């Protein structure tokens, strides 16, 4: 699952966050169809492969979603935005398998994969019609000469095929640098989401770990953003407060 974040997070800097989410949803839909069709003898290895691809593509929205929130909200608004995002995200990780078990118990086990394929398809369509690129290069020497076309279809083509027209220009050196500095963020996001699920089964062990890791994620995003906006000192105070509240308050 974590490999998808390592791959798509740097690609999102090159091709745009919207494009990365769009194509990852398409890959998730293909993986779900593959899983649902593995019903014959000798298909187990292929079924495992489909689940690997499902995890590879399915975690991308959880990685890039917080990055889009940083693009859309001011620093003092991001606490509420992160809370709302992760509430629904974590609710889905718990409710999804539970509802899937009821579906599989009353119908074929493949029905759960067809249902998730339908949900991914709805997300894919919503993404195509309503998701716009949020990345913006704030450097003084950045090139902002691109003008979005008036035609809706042309705008969608520029955003998703492949997305380099609307995404800020990224050189190969910057692409490599962003790939390296994104590793702490991806690791904390993945481990925090995984440990959040484990806390439900072992409440006393690692009780504060998800909040601590989300605090690290918040610090990375806000600190990286404020490095380019001259608000580094403000971000420093904000993340210390957030870290304290996250580790001290109970769920």
Image: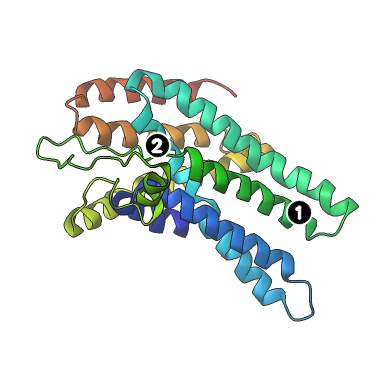
Q: Is residue 158 left or right of residue 41?
A: left
In the picture provided, is 5 more to the left or to the right than 86? Answer: left
Q: Which residue is mark 1?
A: 112
Q: 6 or 204: which is nearer to us? A: 6
> What residue would you read off at disc 2?
68
Instruction: Rate crowding at label 2 as few (under 14), some (14 to 19) or many (20 or more) other CA atoms within 10 Å.
Output: some
| Quarter of the rendering containing residue 173 | bottom left
Picture layout, residue 115 above or below residue 146? below
SS at mark 1 in the image = helix
Residue at coordinates 84% horizontally, 46% vertically from top-left?
102
* Horizontal and vertical percent position of residue 129: 50, 41
Q: Residue at x 21, y 24 (%)?
A: 231
Residue 237 placed where, x, y %?
Answer: 28, 20
Nearer-N-terminus badge (2/1): 2
Quadrant housing the C terminus:
top right
Q: How is the image coloured?
A: rainbow
Q: Is residue 224 left or right of residue 202?
A: left
Cβ atoms under marks 2 and 1 closer than 8 Å: no
């Amino acid at each position: 699952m974590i490999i998808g974040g390592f791959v798509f997070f740097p690609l999102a800097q090159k091709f745009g966050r919207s494009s990365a989410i769009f194509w990852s949803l398409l890959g998730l839909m293909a993986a779900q169809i593959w899983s649902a069709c593995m019903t014959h003898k000798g298909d187990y290895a292929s079924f495992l492969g489909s689940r690997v691809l499902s995890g590879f593509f399915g975690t991308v929205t959880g990685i890039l979603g917080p990055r889009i929130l940083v693009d859309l909200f001011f620093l003092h608004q991001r606490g509420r935005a992160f809370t709302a995002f992760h509430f629904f995200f974590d609710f889905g990780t718990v409710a999804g398998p539970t509802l899937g078990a009821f579906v599989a118990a009353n119908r074929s086990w493949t029905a759960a994969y067809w249902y998730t394929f339908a949900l991914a398809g709805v997300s894919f369509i919503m993404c195509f019609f309503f998701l716009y690129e949020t990345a913006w290069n704030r450097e003084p020497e950045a090139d902002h000469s691109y003008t979005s076309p008036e035609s809706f279809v042309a705008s969608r083509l520029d955003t998703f095929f492949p997305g380099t027209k609307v995404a800020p220009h990224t050189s190969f050196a910057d692409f490599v640098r962003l790939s390296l500095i994104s590793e702490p963020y991806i690791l904390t996001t993945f481990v925090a989401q995984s440990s959040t699920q484990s806390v439900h089964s072992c409440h006393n062990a690692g009780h504060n770990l998800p909040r601590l890791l989300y605090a690290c994620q918040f610090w990375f995003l806000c600190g990286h953003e404020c490095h380019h906006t001259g608000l580094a000192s403000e971000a420093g105070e904000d993340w210390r407060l957030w870290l304290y509240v996250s580790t001290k308050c109970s769920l």
